[in-house]
């Protein structure tokens, strides 16, 4: 999907958050009204959700149930990956079809920090990482990045700038780990990567013009730290090949990992990329799915931002940021809608939904109806 560093940066930047957010309580009725405007029939729509298993995703699911009038089919795997092998059964359960896919990230309004979420049911209402699955995938890459940040040094001396690189990072025979784009870091005349000096565990090279440009003031053997930019390195890792198993999310974000680990909000950027890759991948599987032929389909992808609940709140104040949609009419016409247009379309819909159900009343009816004895 990604061809170059410039493309990767651009792709991440193209997923806009500012000015593109809906409260979930506003997003779901707008989506429902949009579906009806496309010809999907009230009472005959089977919605599905491809969300992470995290309990924070419960509030959006309840709202989908309330506005679409039926509990949504479970189309999701941990981390917000679409279980495309469930397309067939999903297709059989409704005349018209809606699929909502979203990766998610927590947000703490007290610190304005992404990637964390307050778990009110823990003993001390602790804050923990969110999405936890994304955090678990990132931890190995972040540790490798931290090692490189600490063990590549910049040293100005005798009027020149040197880069001192730990021998482990120079070892190209490793099977996995963080690998350096040495031609970005070392002066062109040293492109054979012959060091100026060898020390016991590291080597000195003349720094590239790009490295020199990052330093206004001279430093003496200072770790490169945050100046280890994403274009300076890449990863190698043997990730299990499974289409939609344990490693799907890791595959989805692998190429972009240097940008994610060096980001100020790694879990947010990882969730954005996962949504982008999942939309691209899943749209292709929907087109091919026999069960979806001849049906009205609305497939929408986006990002769920779970704003941590306060002590007196039962649910998070989740926001939805649409990324893209795929619309297919029962007569076969189809189109993809990109973020700006999709946001405008949803914004143009009413958030009033006269078809929404009263869930308390629906539950009360089921409690009072005459019991059916099975045995
Ligand atoms: Zn999660």
Image (cartoon, rainbow, N blue to C red):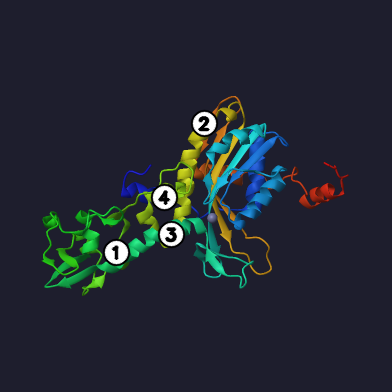
Numbered label attached to residue 321: none
Q: Which residue is drawn at 16% across and 65% down?
A: 203
Mark 4 or 3: in front is 4
Q: How crowded is mark 2: few (under 14 residues within 10 Å), some or many (20 or more)?
A: some
Q: Which of marks 3 and 1 is nearer the N terminus?
A: 1
The quadrant of the picture showing ligand 1 is bottom right
Taking the image as drawn, is residue 20 in sight? Answer: no
Q: Which of marks 4 and 1 is nearer the N terminus?
A: 1
Residue under pointer 3: 266
Q: Residues within 10 Å of mark 1 (few under 14, many from 20)?
A: many
Q: Nearer the viewer, residue 348 or 168?
A: 168
User: Where 58 falls versus 227 (above or below)?
Assistant: above
Tell me if 313 is positioned left or right of 2 in this view. right
Numbered label attached to residue 148: 1
- Write down the quadrant of residue 345 in the picture: top right
Q: Do the residues bearing badges 4 and 1 touch, measured as CB atoms within 8 Å?
A: no
Q: Residues within 10 Å of mark 3 (few under 14, many from 20)?
A: many
Numbered label attached to residue 253: 4
User: Where 123 falls versus 7 (above or below)?
Assistant: below
Could you say whether the residue bearing mark 4 is in a helix, strand or loop?
Answer: helix
């Amino acid at each position: 999907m990604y061809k170059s560093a410039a493309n990767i940066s651009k792709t991440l930047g193209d997923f806009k958050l500012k000015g593109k957010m809906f409260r979930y309580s506003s997003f779901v009725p707008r989506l429902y009204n949009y579906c009806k405007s496309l010809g999907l029939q009230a009472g005959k729509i089977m919605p599905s959700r491809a969300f992470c298993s995290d309990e924070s995703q419960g509030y959006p699911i309840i709202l989908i149930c309330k506005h679409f009038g039926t509990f949504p089919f479970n189309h999701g795997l941990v981390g917000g990956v679409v279980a495309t092998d469930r397309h067939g059964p999903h297709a059989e359960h409704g005349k018209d079809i809606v699929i909502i896919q979203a990766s998610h990230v927590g947000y703490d309004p007290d610190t304005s920090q992404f990637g964390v979420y307050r778990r009110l049911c823990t003993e001390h209402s602790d804050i923990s990482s969110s999405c936890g699955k994304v955090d678990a995938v990132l931890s190995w890459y972040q540790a490798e990045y931290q090692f490189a940040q600490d063990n590549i040094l910049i040293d100005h001396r005798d009027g020149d700038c040197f880069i001192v690189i730990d021998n482990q990072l120079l070892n190209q025979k490793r099977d996995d780990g963080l690998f350096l784009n040495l031609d970005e870091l070392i002066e062109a005349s040293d492109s054979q990567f012959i060091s100026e000096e060898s020390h016991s565990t590291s080597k000195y090279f003349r720094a590239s013009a790009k490295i020199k440009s990052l330093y206004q003031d001279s430093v003496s053997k200072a770790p490169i730290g945050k100046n280890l930019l994403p274009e300076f390195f890449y990863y190698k890792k043997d990730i299990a090949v499974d289409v939609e198993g344990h490693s799907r999310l890791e595959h989805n974000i692998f190429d972009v990992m240097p940008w994610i680990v060096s980001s100020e909000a790694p879990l947010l950027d990882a969730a954005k990329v996962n949504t982008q890759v999942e939309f691209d991948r899943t749209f292709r599987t929907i087109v091919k799915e026999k069960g979806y032929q001849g049906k009205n389909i609305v497939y929408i992808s986006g990002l769920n931002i779970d704003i941590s609940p306060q002590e007196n709140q039962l649910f998070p104040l989740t926001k939805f940021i649409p990324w893209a949609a795929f619309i297919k009419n029962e007569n076969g016409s189809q189109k993809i809608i990109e973020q700006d247009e999709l946001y405008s379309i949803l914004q143009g819909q009413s958030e009033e939904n006269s078809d929404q159900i009263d869930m308390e009343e629906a539950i009360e009816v089921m409690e009072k109806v005459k019991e059916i004895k099975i045995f």
